[in-house]
Image (spheres, rainbow, N blue to C red):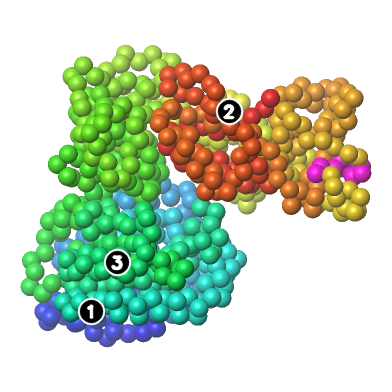
Amino acid sequence: MNNITCKDFNEVLAQAKSYIKNEKLLVQIEKAYQYAELKHQGQLRKNGDPYLYHVLSTAYTLTLWHLDPATIQAGLLHDILEDTPTSVDDLVTEFGQEVAALVSAVTKVSHFAKEKRAEIKSDYLRKLYLSLADDIRVIIIKMADRLHNIRTIEFLDLTKQKVVAKETLEVYASIAHRLGMRELQAELEDRSFAVLLPEEYQKISNLVKKDEENRKQLVDNTIKEIRKTLVKHEKLKFDIYGRSKNLFSIYRKMYYFAKDFNQIHDILAIRIISNSVDNCYAILGYLHQKFTPLPGKFKDYIATPKNNMYQSLHTSIVNKNEIYELQIRTEEMEYYAMVGAAAHWRYKDGEEISPKKKQAEIDEKLNIFQTILDLNTVKSEEANADLETEIKQDLFSELIYVLTPNGKVVTLPLGATILDFAYKIHTEIGETAMGARINGAYSALNTVLKTGDVVEIKTSKTVKPNYDWLTIAKTNFARHKIKKYLIQTTPLKPETKTKGVADNDKRIVNVKEQIDKYLQDHKLRWRIASSSVIYKRLKFLKYPTYDDFCLAIANGTYTIEDAVKEVLFKDSLKFKDFKTRKSVNLSKSNKINDVIVENAPTIKTQLARCCLPIPNEMIIGYISKGQGIKVHRPDCPNIINETKGDKKARTLPTVWNLPATIMRTYDAGIKIYYLDRPGLLADIINLLNLLKVSIQNVDANNQLINHKGVLKLTIKVPDIDRLQQITSSLKKVPDIIDITRIIL
């Protein structure tokens, strides 16, 4: 077979025979192939290949992961219920209950109309995530299925390619990461990256290839020195080789952390595989004696494994002015690092397999399935279908690892507080939590936890949940439990906070469904503007988010039809005069003006200091008495009344002079609303430094009200897109509530 498609069952069988010795089980696998061959006869894929090649490729991948015979059979049969006139009863008769159940579960996850992917995405993802909690083999089959689909994606039209690639990157690669399937994750990411951002993909690919020979030489030389150091110790058994970093992970570091290519040190990476845990630590010690280790870069994932079962020692060393990342682990750890949770279903000859027992063993290490079931339960109770977002936030976001006093590791999303930890241990502990000792020191409930903290919850029978806890809790599970308690114990009034929030959530979901139905019924999807254009329009209309806009529709500010035609259409008449990127032919004389007046490009203008407009956002010129033409944002309260009625004559249409602004930066004022905690200002400043943001002014002098405050910053940015990137990054800092622009 090539590395894309398997076309011969004998290759699947040969790989299966390498670890399955029971002839009866091999016969069952062959029977599944023959059944699939018969049922899929005459069916073709988009590229003209027999459809059978796809199921063979799926099954071949499963054999590479050493999956059990039932899973391989299900891989061969995974599309048979959806694409052929075969019933579940037929499969039970031919292959037994276990195989039939796996195929049925895969079909339930897969079965949704391709042309209506967006409309029923939420239900599809709900089934996908819940399949994880029921039998992990279902998602492993789906992973193998998706891997072959993304490998052959070029045969789809470009629009479908982008839909599939986006879903692969956002959903399947995230699940692969959470399940510890690193090799699969890397390939899904890189292939999706090539489709979604082809220019960036090619740019990074060229950067990697440009200096590839030199990097290889550096790594080879360092490997020789390491080998020379270790062979002196005869008892050490090891293998050593260089490893390459996948392109999307390089892009992610460059984009999200504002790093240059040559600042990413783990591009020079070496992996050392040994035969025992003791030898791993011995190798680490010898190498730290030989080379200079970088402070703060040592991580012991053997003693404290990651939540996806990953184990290894990580360190960074300096050799001849170059930094190298070292990974040291055993052969078993290397296998788990490659295939993750699938390793728990690795078939061993003669083993009696209990799916429930296997599932329990995996969850003991992954700590994922029960959380999904808990979230699904609370979401069902609230009749809210947004399980997808909540699972992503609580399970697939960046995680921290904290410990109970008896040494049990508890995983929580980044930014989680003591209160989240308490609810994770048990609901009753959460409801009576009054604080905790972190590493021996007493701390309040809103204290943000970090990896390595030892947390001992302090409870009191007199403590009960209150509305402030909804602000303190960061995990959706804890927030749901708090809301449920408040609803059950508080005599609610119409204006009650919790009821209002819950009602608003339902109304927003209802409006989104109505908009979706309107677009579908009238076949108008093609007329919808891009998300960035809609975002700018909503900002102009003073709606911070799309949800706020939907709530306004629910309150009667707009009808569904008006909302679609006036705000969402790309050719909206309401917004036809607001051009943010209009190209203008410029003479040398007007290249010094940041903004030019339409039809009068030589007139001088000034940016208003009250609202500090920045390039690429909507602007309007205003003739000020004695001060010339001042350029404001349209939502600036200082001119908003001047743009109505007779006074409108003093306004002028203006556009950004992009050739003049491209090499300049501009002041932008932002207000950061936050929940007070120690170290918050340092976190904000450190992030801005990481993003290479120039800070012009910091005003932290404000009165705290209910532990909440406002921080005012003035920063330098080149345009509105960069400001939005910065504010988006800042909003991920724990305890930041909201960020708005400053208007004086």
Q: Amino acid at mark 2?
A: Asp
First of labels 3, 2 by sequence position: 3
Q: Nearer the viewer, mark 3 or mark 2?
A: 3
Depicted 477 relative to depicted 488: above or below:
below
SS label for mark 1: loop
- Label 2 environment density (alpha carbons within 10 Å; few <14, some 14–19, many ≥20): few
Question: Which residue is label 3 attached to?
Answer: 289
First of labels 2, 1 by sequence position: 1
Magenta segment main secondary structure: loop
- Label 3 environment density (alpha carbons within 10 Å; few <14, some 14–19, many ≥20): few
Position in image of residue 556 (x %, y %): 58, 25
| Quadrant including the N terminus | bottom left
| Quadrant including the C terminus | top right
Question: Which residue is label 1 attached to?
Answer: 232
Q: Does residue 744 appear in this view?
A: yes
- Label 1 environment density (alpha carbons within 10 Å; few <14, some 14–19, many ≥20): few
Q: Which mark is residue 61?
A: none
Question: Which residue is label 2 attached to?
Answer: 699
Confirm whether the magenta stretch covers residue 420: no
The answer to whether the residue labelled 2 contacts the one labelled 1, judged by CB atoms less than 8 Å apart, is: no
Q: Residue at x 36, y 53 (%)?
A: 296
Quadrant in the rendering for residue 542:
top right
Position in image of residue 573 (x %, y %): 74, 39
In the rendered structure, the answer to whether residue 550 lies left or right of residue 361 reads right
Q: Residue at x 15, y 58 (%)?
A: 358
Depicted 668 relative to depicted 494: above or below:
below
Q: Residue at x 45, y 80 (%)?
A: 217
SS label for mark 3: helix
Q: Does residue 78 appear in this view?
A: no
Q: Which residues are magenta?
A: 594-602
Q: Amino acid at mark 3?
A: Gln
Query: Disc 3 and disc 2: Cα gap in Å?
Result: 47 Å
